[in-house]
Image (spheres, rainbow, N blue to C red):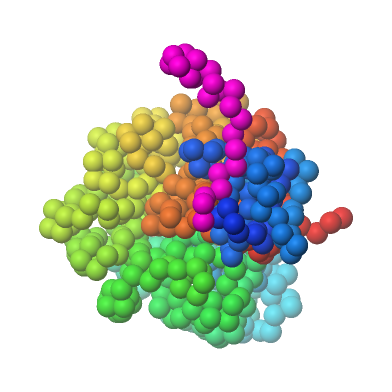
Amino acid sequence: MTNRRLALALVLTPLVAFVPRTAAAQVADLIVTNARIYTVDENRPVVEAMAIRDGRVVATGPARGIMTMRGPATQVLDLHGRTVIPGMIDAHVHLLNLGNSLRNVDLVGTTSYDEVVARVAARARETPAGTWIQGRGWDQNDWGDTRFPTHEALSRAVPDHPVVLTRIDGHATLVNAAAMKAASLTSETRDPSGGRLERGAGGAPTGVLVDAAMGLVNRHVPPASKEQLKTAVQAAIAEMNRWGLTSVHDAGVGRAVIDVYEEVAREGRFDIRDYVMVANNDAAIDHYLQRGPQLGLYNGRLWIKAIKISADGALGSRGAALIEPYSDDPANTGLALVPAGRVRDVAVKALRSGFQVNVHAIGDRANRTVLNEFEQALTDVPVQDHRFRIEHAQIIHPDDVPRFAELGVIPSMQASHQTSDMYWAVNRLGPTRVLGAYAWRSLLNSGVVIANGSDLPVERTNPLISFMASVSRQDARGWPVGGWFPEQRMTREEALKSMTIWAAYSGFMEKEVGSLEPGKLADFVVLDQDIMRVPPELILNTSVLSTYLGGKAVFQKPVP
């Protein structure tokens, strides 16, 4: 047969279901059929049906072949043409913070300081005097007056409760007079290393504390009980399942909280796969390095194999460490949150123990410093498959873009940050430096993969917000027309991979999750429309109808 005739024969030969020999004689527990299933399997990217047994995919392909695995007890899920994608993975979250935010004062979307004060005052009216009130989500960049607020209006409205309100990025807090009194903050209080108190006349604190300074008040907030923590953890997981998340990478978790995770997981109430990054604390790091990497504990619920360090602050609060000063604050180049050499030292220990190191770096100076210290560590302890990560990687000097691929460093980025920050990022960075901000295409073209996420609760939980941002670089209203620096967009295929198989790879989990291939865990999501084909402006209208973890539903949208 000539090559041309062979090629034609291959085109005309219908695909058959991929049923491994070991699966051919099996009876499926669940068959998903009559669907458009995006498998993220390079060999079979779109199929009509799949079979699941013992929580894993055993076959994919046309319904005719898959239905041969139907038995008397097989559940058949006919989706009537709906769309299925692998369970979505958010590569950077703060799980407990999300749980806490669900019970604290929600300040996301406030359009003025007055609105913030009103929401806190409403909570105070139903809270016993003297009780601490916490909230999160304010962003002065969304207000008519974009300067940092001062405490006076909040202190007048809520004089009898200490109040701590965390900025949306988690890198600044606003506190009232009662909270400052509890923490003994005065004009004599010195800025801690890696932090800053905003000050007014005579050096008096204005109520805004940036980065390390937040701890001056936070340490006085009464800790939650174990039962409160467990309740918050389960609430966060349920919220993430509702939006189609089946795996998350949990950034900077302390030992006490990890112990709570393990307790909830042992009880069988941890319905998500959590790749935990241990917080930057010497005692905790030494404990988990001695314990060794933990993979798929409690029926595939917990992985403990990474360490998280924060190298700088955030762009919105001008704490991101920049090579040159802020364009809108010429005396400020941001904050370094760890001493020189800290990343290198932790990375050396991690490499020797089989752990990954993931470092928060937003500014170009922080990214360069982290890359330098990664390089030093890898020179000392050469490891081929280390998969070190830079979390956020928001502003990168052009000279440093190719270094990610050269060093094997994965940029773990949150596309939704771009659509949140684009309104004011040029003011912070100027017209030239902003070209290196949220530079997904430049990084992809250099030869790396990108792990996508949300940094929730910094951004909304819905992962399709980041999918939409990745492919359009526009907000929910379609602004700006054509996209913000549209040359940095991802394709839809890349965007889907960034929140499935690439995210899985960034957590050493790609053999278990990230695609719907035979042998992998059956984590998948049913959507009411096809995000790979609908116009970009309709992506955010998509609803999650159900979320499956290991072939079992952990969320189903109520039928109206």
Judge whether residue 256 can be spotted in this image: yes
Tell me if residue 323 comes above or below residue 130 in the rendering.
Answer: above
Q: Residue at (36%, 66%) from the top-left corner? A: 305
Task: Return the residue nearer the eye: 318 or 243.
Answer: 243
> Is 542 on the left-hand or right-hand side of 259?
right
Q: Quadrant of residue 558?
A: bottom right
> Where residue 236 appears, x then y in whole percent?
60, 67
> Is 53 on the left-hand or right-hand side of 285?
right
> Where residue 59 appears, x then y in whole percent?
58, 50
> Where residue 309 appears, x then y in whole percent?
33, 62
Quadrant the N terminus occupies: top left
Task: Return the residue nearer the eye: 341 or 269.
Answer: 269
> Is 160 on the left-hand or right-hand side of 202?
right
> Where residue 224 appears, x then y in whole percent?
55, 82
Q: Which residues are magenta?
A: 1-22
Q: Residue at (31%, 60%) from the top-left corner? A: 357
Q: Residue at (75%, 62%) from the top-left corner? A: 72
Quadrant the C terminus occupies: bottom right
Tell me if residue 468 comes above or below residue 510 in the rendering.
Answer: above
Q: Residue at (52%, 42%) from the top-left corner? A: 40
> Is 537 on the left-hand or right-hand side of 255?
right
Residue, far front: 1
Judge whether residue 142 can be spotted in this image: no
Residue, far right: 560
- The question of residue 69 being in magenta is answered with no
- The question of residue 8 being in magenta is answered with yes
Q: Total label count? A: 0
Task: Return the residue nearer the eye: 206 or 5.
Answer: 5
Tell me if residue 336 comes above or below residue 145 in the rendering.
Answer: below
